[in-house]
Image (cartoon, rainbow, N blue to C red):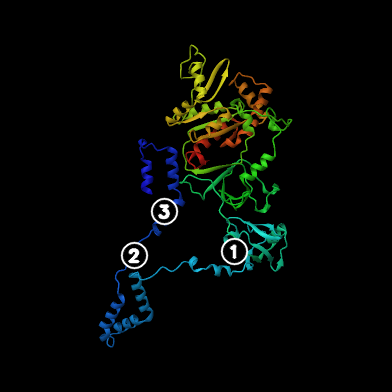
């Protein structure tokens, strides 16, 4: 493995290997899990053992014959003779000779020795007594359901006390607890188990059921199927969830927190734990949360309304998907979970700054490029207008004919485009690739609708949302730059409020694309936060969408 890692560092570009594939391969081979598996494989590798010699029974007989004359006069010979004549020692030598000669047969397996008739003799109503030691208030990690009037174990949380003991199983029927009938109320039994401390004795009727493994979607053969990580796009509190079977078993989480999924057998409730540590708990499945969010319809648009605090009338409308109208479809997307994978540190291809107009994106972009021009670059926009006298092609703009630009737009060669004063303007996708080929991170300040195209393995963006501060703070910041003579452009109260409203709307519609958020209430502090976040990409592991790798 070390030889492979050394060769990866010296791999020539002529091999045609993709950078992301090499990064992922290096991450796997440097993983402690993979290294442990390699060591275990080396120890368990089959080694053919050959006997030093056979016919050792005859050899022992010869030795006894040779030393028979010395037994009476030599204590050592007498002791050796005694050992060689021991029944246990002779049996050991006989067993060795039989194994060396391979004169043995493989014993039949347990499956072959158990006949159907003997299996049928096991009574279906066999009762077992299970004893558990716990502290008051300590969760057991088990939920119940009522089935035919009986309390049945519905699920056992992965890693819980019950799971570690392995004495109870899903489908087991609980008859008694400490000699008392449990009845048919799951909530009452949960409370009894929670409040009891010390020894708990359960009288159960085993379920004897084999639960089939859930069908999983096909994955790339190199994916470790037992490692599933998700990034939720919503906050969850089990205490306020009326659908969860047991609130104490729920796992609260925050939007963007990485969750390790350990069990997906239940179609409605998955078992998960946070990657930073903690107990396993129940979370709503993708299917359940999609149904729940689809049921609660959005009746308001919220555009032009701060934080959507004022609702509008319900509107029903049907329309074909149009690029110009894609924000309307974005608003109705259901973003529940995103599957991610952990990658070692690497430089992203693009840095995308998203925010409302006038929030400071261009200032932050220019500062980064001035500070480190060899690390960061940007694209030159194209336009169909004629160049002015002082303008040179390829500096501020790339100048092309309107017909050529329209052809490229139809062919999908532009990331985004628009028309102003009768002229077309746009950002070409090839311009982004050109900056990346130079070994630089391409900084883009684009409209949020472009994130659908950018958030792929082709561009590997780090998306930073530059949020507007509160209206009073924004007003004070604008007054400060005007008084200092930094800008002569005066913004009205309506302009400032429009910036705050637009920032809130972008956050509502596109927050599931954001990797990092900065509230720009101070340009210097906002730049420091942006710089730290970008530098961490090259020094700390990253969680990226799984489809970037597989």
Task: Say which label, 2 or 3, has the lower sequence index.
Answer: 3
- Residue at x 66%, y 25% (from the top left corner): 496
Q: Position of residue 413 (x, y in %)?
A: 49, 25
Q: Position of residue 114 (x, y in %)?
A: 51, 68
Q: Is residue 523 visible?
A: no
Q: Is residue 230 visible?
A: yes
Q: Is residue 416 left or right of residue 76?
A: right
Q: Residues within 10 Å of mark 1 (few under 14, many from 20)?
A: few
**Which residue is nearer to you in this view: 467 or 477?**
467
Query: Label for residue 167?
Result: 1
Q: Position of residue 347 (x, y in %)?
A: 47, 36
Gap in angstroms between the C-alphas marked 1 and 3: 32 Å
**Which residue is nearer to you in this view: 58 or 439?**
58
**Which residue is nearer to you in this view: 329 or 427?**
329
Mark closer to the observer (2, 3): 2
Query: Label for residue 49?
Result: 2
Determine the secondary structure under disc 2.
Answer: loop
Task: Say which label, 1 or 2, has the lower sequence index.
Answer: 2
**Which residue is nearer to you in this view: 138 or 60?**
60
Relative to 136, is 503 above or below?
Answer: above
Mark closer to the observer (1, 3): 1
Q: Which residue is mark 3?
A: 38
- Residue at x 38%, y 41% (from the top left corner): 9
Gap in angstroms between the C-alphas marked 2 and 3: 22 Å
Query: Label for residue 241?
Result: none
Q: Is residue 81 left or right of residue 530?
A: left
Relative to 197, is 361 above or below?
Answer: above
Determine the secondary structure under disc 1.
Answer: loop
Res 324 → quadrant:
top right
């Amino acid at each position: 493995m070390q030889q492979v890692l050394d060769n990866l560092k010296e791999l020539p570009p002529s091999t045609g290997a993709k950078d992301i594939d090499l990064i992922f391969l290096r991450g796997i081979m440097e993983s402690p899990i993979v290294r442990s598996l390699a060591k275990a494989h080396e120890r368990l590798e089959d080694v053919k053992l050959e006997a030093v010699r056979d016919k050792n029974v005859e050899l022992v007989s010869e030795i006894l014959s040779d030393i028979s004359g010395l037994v009476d006069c030599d204590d050592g010979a007498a002791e050796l003779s005694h050992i060689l004549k021991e029944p246990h020692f002779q049996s050991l030598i006989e067993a060795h000779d039989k194994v060396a000669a391979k004169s043995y047969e493989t014993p039949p397996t347990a499956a072959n020795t158990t006949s159907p008739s003997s299996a049928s003799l096991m009574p279906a109503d066999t009762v077992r007594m299970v004893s558990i030691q716990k502290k008051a208030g300590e969760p057991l990690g088990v939920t119940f359901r009522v089935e035919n009037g009986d309390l049945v174990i519905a699920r056992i949380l992965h890693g819980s006390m019950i799971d570690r003991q392995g004495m109870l199983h899903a489908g087991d029927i609980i008859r008694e607890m400490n000699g008392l009938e449990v009845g048919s109320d799951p909530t009452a039994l949960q409370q009894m188990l929670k409040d009891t401390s010390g020894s708990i004795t359960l009288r159960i009727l085993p379920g004897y059921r084999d639960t089939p493994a859930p069908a999983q979607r096909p994955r790339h053969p190199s994916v470790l199927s037992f490692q599933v990580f998700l990034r939720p796009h919503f906050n969850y509190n089990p205490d306020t969830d009326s659908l969860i079977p047991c609130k104490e078993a729920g796992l609260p989480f925050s939007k963007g927190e990485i969750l390790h999924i350990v069990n997906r057998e239940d179609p409605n409730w998955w078992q998960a734990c946070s990657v930073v540590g903690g107990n396993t708990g129940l979370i709503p499945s993708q299917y359940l949360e999609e149904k729940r969010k689809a049921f609660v319809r959005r009746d308001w648009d919220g555009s032009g309304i701060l934080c959507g605090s004022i609702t509008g009338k319900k509107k029903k409308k049907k329309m074909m998907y149009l690029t110009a109208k894609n924000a309307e479809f974005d608003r109705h997307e259901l973003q529940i979970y995103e599957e991610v994978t952990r990658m070692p540190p690497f430089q992203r291809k693009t840095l995308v700054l998203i925010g409302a107009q006038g929030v400071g994106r261009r200032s932050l972009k220019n500062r980064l490029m001035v500070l480190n021009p060899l690390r960061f670059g940007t694209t030159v926009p194209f336009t169909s207008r004629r160049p002015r006298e002082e303008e040179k092609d390829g500096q501020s703009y790339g100048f092309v004919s309107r017909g050529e630009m329209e052809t490229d737009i139809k062919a999908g060669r532009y990331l985004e485009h628009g028309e102003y004063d009768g002229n077309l303007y746009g950002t070409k996708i090839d311009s982004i690739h050109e900056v990346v080929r130079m070994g630089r991170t391409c900084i883009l300040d684009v409209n949020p609708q472009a994130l659908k195209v950018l958030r792929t393995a082709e561009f590997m963006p780090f998306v930073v949302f530059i949020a507007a501060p509160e209206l009073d703070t924004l007003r004070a910041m604008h007054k400060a730059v005007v008084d200092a003579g930094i800008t002569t452009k005066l913004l009205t109260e309506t302009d400032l409020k429009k910036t705050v409203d637009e920032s809130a709307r972008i956050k509502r519609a596109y927050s599931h694309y954001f990797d990092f958020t900065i509230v720009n209430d101070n340009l210097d502090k906002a730049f420091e936060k942006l710089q730290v976040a970008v530098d961490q990409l090259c020094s700390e592991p990253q969680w990226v969408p799984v489809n970037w790798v597989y």
